[in-house]
Image: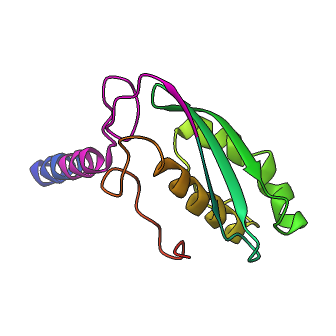
Amino acid sequence: MKKLLFTGIILTLVCLLFASCTAKKRNGNGDLWGTPMQNSVTVSGTARGHNELGIGVELTLVNGKITNVVLDLSNDTLIYTQLVQSRAPEIIIQQNTTNIDTIAGASETTRGIRRAGRKALLQVPGVNESNVYPLRPGDAE
């Protein structure tokens, strides 16, 4: 019985340790990038999607939160853009990041959104390589 209790305590502590290591820090304004923002800013970025012509992402941030997302998927393959057009902006706003999980059936288009979104976020005053998310494996252009 003592062994089982000890094992349970150890597992709980390990879980808490991993949870604390992966938590994202937010500053007082609620943004994820560690840079206080008092104004509204609109930024954009483009990157390769499913085909080589590119995907555009325009983000509006108010006080460090993404409040509006406009995707320009007109140069990407239609079947893949239909899968992400209605879902991606909502997910980006809810999660307050363009570093979204891959949408099934549209992997390259989603990667393009992440790449273009990251480029857009790097245009926000005070955001740089050290406080924006790193590229995921396979996301490099």
Left or right of 32 in this view: 61: right
Location of residue 47 in the rendering, given as x and y in whole percent from the top left corner:
64, 66
Which one is nearer the viewer's eye here, 132 or 58? 58
Location of residue 112 in the rendering, given as x and y in whole percent from the top left corner:
65, 65
Q: Is residue 31 above or below residue 59?
A: above
Q: How many marks?
A: 0
Task: Please report the bounds of the magenta region as a residue range.
Answer: 13-42
Which one is nearer the viewer's eye here, 77 or 54? 54
For the point 67% across and 51% down, which residue is it? 57
Which one is nearer the viewer's eye here, 86 or 121? 121
For the point 21% across and 49% down, which residue is it? 17
Residue lying furthest right in this view? 78
Question: Which image quarter: residue 95?
Answer: top right
For the point 34% across and 42% down, which residue is it? 24
Location of residue 70 in the rendering, given as x and y in whole percent from the top left corner:
72, 43
For the point 35% across and 42% down, which residue is it? 126
Observer able to see residue 99: no
Observer able to see residue 10: yes
Q: Is residue 51 above or below residue 122?
A: below
Location of residue 88 in the rendering, given as x and y in whole percent from the top left corner:
70, 48
Q: How is the image coloured?
A: rainbow
Instruction: Inspect the magenta stretch and tell me whether residue 24 lies in it.
Output: yes
Q: Is residue 59 above or below residue 79?
A: above
Instruction: Quadrant for the C terminus, please.
Output: bottom right
